[in-house]
Amino acid sequence: MENGVVHLNKAALHIGNSVLTAQGTYALHGPVKLSVAAKQFPAKALTDVLGQNGFVVDAPIDFAADLSGTGDDLQADVSAQLGSGTANGIAFSGAYALFNIRNGMITVQQASGSRDPYKVSASGTIPVSALKGGQTSESMDLDVRLDNAGLDILTFLTPYVTEASGPIQGGIKVSGTLDAPRVNGDIAIKNGTIRFKDTQYLLADINADLAFKGNSAVLSGSGTMDKKGKKNPGRVSLDGQASWSGRSLDTYSLAADLSGLYLDCPYYEGPLTGYLRVEPGDGRPKVSGLMQVDNTTVDIPLALASSSDGPDLDLDFTLTLGDKVRLYNPALYDLMVSGSVTFKGNLNHPQPSGRFEATRGTVHYLDTNFRVTKAKADFSRYDSFLPYIDAEGFSRVGQYNVMLTLRGRADNMDLMLRSDPPLTKPQIVSLITLRNGDERPQSSLNAEDVDSLIGSGIRMTLNSLGITQSLERALSLDMLTVTNGSLDLNDRNTDMSRNYYNIEMGKYLFNDFMVTAAFGLNHGDDRFGVMYDLGRNFSVNAWTSDDNQFIGGVYKYSF
């Protein structure tokens, strides 16, 4: 370095079979005459050196750049070519660019990017300040051609699209200045498909048109999403428009209409019917709409309980749960729900109203299903999307009815346990975890306790393997438990039957009438039966097995 001028007689960096070379002089505020070239050099290494870590390119690059002019007014002639590689983890076939920099303007002679069989190309002029987000009166004239482009470009732009296919046709011309841009042209999509992250079915038959008219744009499009082979699949249609002055958005609107659009993802499985609108609100965008949900299974994401702020949006949205809506989580609940809730206000300070009610179902607690007798979720708390829960349920364990009560906000509920005949809370917990039906103190473990613990272990193992959840979901069971002892009441007191373990299940066909089945896990006995509750303390039971039958009653009393 001499008098503020860097002299490079020859510099080379080798990484494996790749090389980066530079030769010439560079003055920060003086003349520049520098040549830089690379062959099969890792593009990722260059982006790391330049501090461009937001967009990771992993591909070999060949380029040659001749820099001239001065450090304050740099001129450059550049040609660059990327080989096959990935950009942010998405594969591409290659890219090429040939451009010059003169007097603060970039003149793109040729530029293209490809992912077989699709290709995007561009040419024209754009100010250097555009790369830094500047707003100046410098003019630009850039043509972008999409005749060989594809929808898979979406996988570059968002992690929520995992795959996409279909051609994008047309092109746009960007003109005007950086502080007053104009866009003209038309982009069309024909018969495209998109798979969104964690969804089972493709958004297919996508046909859309985006027309730019100087200072405005109009969007129209449609697509289908449903089970494969359905004759009349669920549909979505989109319509939108926007206009701008300079760099400011003047007007905008977006409307989405859904008709039986079938969504299958971890938290929702079923059709969606309704509409959504996005338009200007009180100084921020407003999302309004109505969504009707029928014949659907829903699970509520635990993330809804988080307090993190969302985007600043106004709200006027109504959600209605109609016929056959099942709220299901294998570890928490299985409920048939209905009702309607409206959310107003804004996303960070909602004003909800309305409620959902469970018509029937179960709540799962301590490995026990409690049949719901009352369950309401009231949405009337300002500043929260979470409802106030008021729910009651019961479960029969041995000769006891155990009652569960839940009250409070969904993320902070009070839980109460009661039993008939009465037991203390520790005794109730012991009863429903160990299936221990007597009232003696649990200060020591005898053989019956060990059998109960083994039964609890078997239940936990089946739960961890997902077997109990799959059975409960497939058969909509109201009871599923593991017991020990013979399935024949006449053999209950034999020593041999003490080592028998069974899985017992039941389903209410209507109020107070349950069909039951029991199967031996380590023996060959099976049993099928019915149980009818005639009152709080009396029920009629009947069952049959290969070797025996039984019909009788069970009366419970406390003293």
Image (cartoon, grey):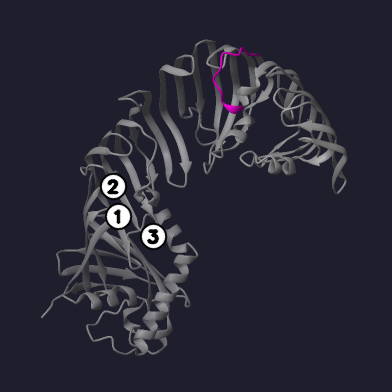
Q: Is residue 140 magenta?
A: yes
- Residue 344: x and y in percent read 26, 33
In this view, the residue in front, 113 or 451, is 113
- Residue 487: x and y in percent read 37, 76
Which one is closest to the eye, mark 3 or mark 2? Answer: 2
Give the CA separation, mark 3 to mark 2.
19 Å
Report whether 299 appears left or right of 420: right
Region in magenta: 132-141
Q: Which residue is mark 1?
A: 411
Q: Which residue is mark 2?
A: 386
Task: Give the residue drawn at x 16%, y 69%.
Answer: 538
| Placement of the C terminus among the 4 image quadrants | bottom left
Task: Give the residue drawn at x 74%, y 44%.
Answer: 45
Report whether 379 appears left or right of 207: left
Discs 3, 2 touching: Cβ within 8 Å: no
User: Label 3 sits on what residue type?
Assistant: Ala
Asked whether residue 485 appears in the rendered view, the answer is no
Asked whether residue 6 appears in the rendered view, the answer is yes
Helix, strand or loop status at disc 2: loop
Which one is closest to the eye, mark 3 or mark 1? Answer: 1
Instruction: Pick whichever of labels 3 and 2 is earlier in the sequence.
Output: 3
Mark 3 closeness class: few <14, some 14–19, many ≥20 residues within 10 Å: some
Q: Which residue is mark 3?
A: 331
